[in-house]
Amino acid sequence: MFVLHCGSSAMRYLSKSLRHFYQLLISMTSKELRARYKHTFFGFFWLLVNPLLQMSVMAFVFRFFIKEEIIHYPYLLFLGLLIWNFFSLSLSKATPSIVYERALIKKARFPREVIPLSIVLSNFINTGLALGLLFIPVLFLGTLQISSFFYLLVALLLLFLLTSGLSLLTSALNVMFRDINFFVQAFLIVWFYATPIVYPLSFVPNQYQWLWFFNPLTSILQLAQYACLHTPLPNWQTFTSNLAVIVLVATLGILVFKKQATKFDDWL
């Protein structure tokens, strides 16, 4: 009887903690969304401006270097830039977020994870809306199928998991090692060109394609491109290795953040 009572109490405590975490995450995400587009006329449509400008410039420039015609290249490029901008913007902003919110952390006790996760979630909502707008011209291409939404859902879930895990990892490490923020900014430049955004993976020579096994964005992009434009799916070797990297990064991010969160007050 005592064991049942203790178990019931533990379940109620866990349920209350999860509810508190969820409410706090939603509140901070809402705050992040409102602050970003406060006093702007076009609101979240600014999220489309950067990838549209990037797509226009890159599509014009790279047509002089890419001799082989790529079907629906502007759409492929725009979709890739949407996904990349979500990933890079979230990681860039989440990495120093714990340091920037030092006053809030010292003032109140709450799950520290909500700070970087609210940034990722707010960007994820914006990206989802932008993808919804992308579907309008894609509908006229006739490449969308009922199964497309399943593949797009898988791509978005993996993207959110990867970005959240990496954001937790870098934001925790940046509290003790402030060089992490500068390292992330520099590494994102390299990561962009190591991701098949401006070029399809098929353009990479076969003997070098194994390098893309370590870039989890490869399969995410290929799944999203297949869903919207019916391009080839990632092969099983690429998908399996990319999935393993995503799970490893997410697990490492959670464990490191949990461990370091107890020391934040000492380092801030």
Image: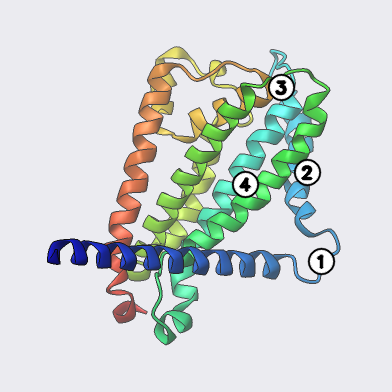
| Residue 268 vertical position relative to residue 116 in the rendered view, above or below | below
Q: Which callout, 4 or 1, points to the residue nearer the camera?
A: 1
Residue shown at the point (66%, 45%) measured from the top left: 128
Q: Quadrant of residue 213?
A: top left
| Residue 257 place in picture, x, y as percent | 33, 61
CA separation in Å, label 3 and label 1: 33 Å
Read off the residue under disc 3. Answer: 144
Q: Amino acid at mark 4?
A: Asn
Amino acid marked by disc 3:
Leu
Can you identify the residue that label 2 sits on? Answer: 53
Q: Please tell me whether mark 3 sits on a helix, a strand or a loop.
A: loop
* Residue plotted at (42% across, 79% down): 105
Q: Which residue lies under the disc numbered 1?
A: 40
Q: Earlier in the sequence, mark 4 or mark 1?
A: 1
Q: Residues within 10 Å of mark 2 (few under 14, many from 20)?
A: few
Name the residue that disc number 4 marks: 85
Q: Residues within 10 Å of mark 3 (few under 14, many from 20)?
A: some
Residue type (three-letter) at the residue carrying disc 1? Thr
Q: How many discs appear?
A: 4
